[in-house]
Every structure is written in structure tokens, then in C-alpha cells.
Image (spheres, helix red, strand yellow):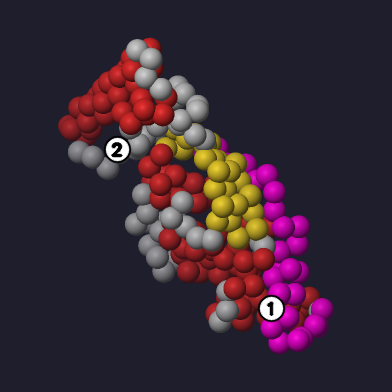
């Protein structure tokens, strides 16, 4: 899994507080007042957060993850096409350390066998002349994909609160942590503190 921040709003706090002040025809520009307003917004009205956006390139993640990721709104996605890009056999393997050790080795072998079988059939179908767009039906959800994702700060906050919980699936939880680690230095410090505080109540470990 790899995540790269390729574009972002240069000064999130400035644009967010400017949008918020427009609602009240208030144009104070002091740093302390902007910070107070930002904290109030986190409790009352999150819509000004939508004016700050972040764009990521995400690679080496499974189709299972991307199916979960595109459920988040508001966001824009452009994902690698399986119609035009041939799969190369690379896929995600989940961590099965939670299993009873006496069954884990057998489970891993079965998983690897299932992946190999699916990709073998995929390449055989293509060799027979079947189009990639039709052969892809046999590909597993574990198949690696890549995408560009642009998400505003309100949606990112929601992503963190849902996907950094210990209840989230491991792969997308790892992704959320990578995004948070990469971008937290660009967030207003109040938002980072707010996310940390809320996560502590969600079972984040």
C-alpha cells in the first residue's frame, strides 16, 4: 500500500474561516479569533470544512478497499480501469494472525491457492481471445488497484472517525492511518486534536 499527497489547499485554516465568516458578515482576521471560530465549527457547523481539499494517489490496494472507500462523500475518484488495464496477478493478502495457529497455515495455503486459480483462469481467458472487460469477471476482490482521490476536509474527518476505529477492516484502517500521518501537518492543529480525542472513544488502539 502506498499513499502520496499530490495536491492540497495551501492554507486550510484561512479558507475555512473565511467561508465561515461569510455567513455572519464577520471579517475579523486575528489568528486567535480564527482558531476560536474553527473550534466552534467543529461543534456546530462543519460545512466550511468542505472548502479545503486534499488529493491523493493511492496504489497497491485491493478492490475490496476501493469498494469501501468510494462510499465516502463528498469526494472525487478516478480508479484504474480493469477494462483497459490488464491485471498482473498482484493482490492483497490479509493478516490472519487472529486465527488459531493450528488452522492458520492451512487457511493461508487455501487463500493463496484460490488467488492463483483465479488469476490463472483470467490469463487463460485472455489468451483465448476474450476481452479484458469480460475476463475481469473472474478476478477476485483482492486484486490490486490504484486511484486518485480528492476529498474535502469535512469528508476526511469523517473518514478518520469511521475507518480508524478498531471496528474497521484492517486494510482500510491502514490506509486511513497513512492518510492521517501524511496530511496531519497540513491540518489546523485543532482538527488533529479533535480527531485524536474522538478516536479515543471509538476503540482506536
Q: Name the quarter where the C terminus is drawn.
A: bottom left
Residue occupying the point 23% across, 40% down: 99
Toward which corner of the image does residue 58 lie, by quadrant?
top right
Q: Confirm whether residue 6 shows in the render.
A: yes
Badge 1 local density, few (<14 within 10 Å), some, or many (20+)? many
Task: Judge by depth and name the residue closer to the eye, 70 or 98.
Answer: 70
Task: Judge by depth and name the residue closer to the eye, 155 or 189.
Answer: 155
Residues rendered magenta in the picture: 1-29
Q: Given this view, does label 2 or label 1 mark the residue nearer the observer?
A: 1
Mark 2 element type: loop
State whether residue 95 is above or below residue 204. above
Residue 9: in magenta span:
yes
Residue occupying the point 40% across, 65% down: 202
Choose the circle earlier in sequence order: 2 or 1. 1
State whether residue 134 is above or below residue 72. above
Q: Position of residue 196 (x, y in %)?
A: 52, 64
Residue occupying the point 74% across, 68% down: 15
Residue occupying the point 55% across, 43% down: 78
Q: Which residue is mark 2?
A: 96
Badge 2 local density, few (<14 within 10 Å), some, or many (20+)? few
Residue 36: in magenta span:
no
Q: Which residue is mark 1?
A: 20
Q: Position of residue 82 (x, y in %)?
A: 45, 31
Toward which corner of the image does residue 125 lie, by quadrant?
top left
Relative to 153, 29 lies left or right: right
Q: Position of residue 150 (x, y in %)?
A: 60, 52
Relative to 40, 104 lies left or right: left
Toward which corner of the image does residue 22 lie, by quadrant?
bottom right
Please tell me the numbered disc located at residue 130. none
Residue farthest to the top, as pictured: 127
Mark 1 element type: helix
Q: Position of residue 4 (x, y in %)?
A: 62, 42
Amino acid at each position: 500500500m502506498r499513499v502520496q499527497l499530490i495536491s492540497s489547499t495551501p492554507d486550510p485554516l484561512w479558507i475555512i474561516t473565511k467561508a465561515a465568516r461569510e455567513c455572519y458578515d464577520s471579517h475579523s482576521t486575528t489568528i486567535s479569533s480564527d482558531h476560536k471560530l474553527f473550534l466552534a465549527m467543529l461543534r456546530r457547523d462543519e460545512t466550511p470544512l468542505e472548502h479545503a481539499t486534499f488529493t491523493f494517489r493511492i496504489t497497491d490496494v485491493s478492490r475490496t478497499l476501493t469498494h469501501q472507500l468510494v462510499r465516502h462523500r463528498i469526494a472525487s475518484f478516478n480508479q484504474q480501469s480493469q477494462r483497459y488495464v490488464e491485471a498482473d496477478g498482484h493482490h492483497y493478502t490479509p493478516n490472519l494472525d487472529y486465527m488459531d495457529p493450528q488452522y492458520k497455515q492451512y487457511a493461508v495455503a487455501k487463500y493463496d491457492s484460490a488467488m492463483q486459480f483465479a488469476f490463472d483462469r483470467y490469463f487463460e481467458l485472455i489468451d483465448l481471445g476474450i476481452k479484458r472487460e469480460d475476463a475481469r469477471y473472474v478476478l477476485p476482490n483482492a486484486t490490486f488497484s490504484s486511484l486518485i482521490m480528492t476529498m474535502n476536509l469535512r469528508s476526511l474527518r469523517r473518514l478518520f472517525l469511521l475507518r480508524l476505529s478498531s471496528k474497521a477492516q484492517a486494510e482500510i484502517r491502514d490506509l486511513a492511518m497513512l492518510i492521517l500521518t501524511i496530511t496531519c501537518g497540513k491540518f489546523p492543529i485543532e482538527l488533529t486534536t479533535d480527531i485524536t480525542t474522538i478516536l479515543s472513544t471509538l476503540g482506536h488502539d
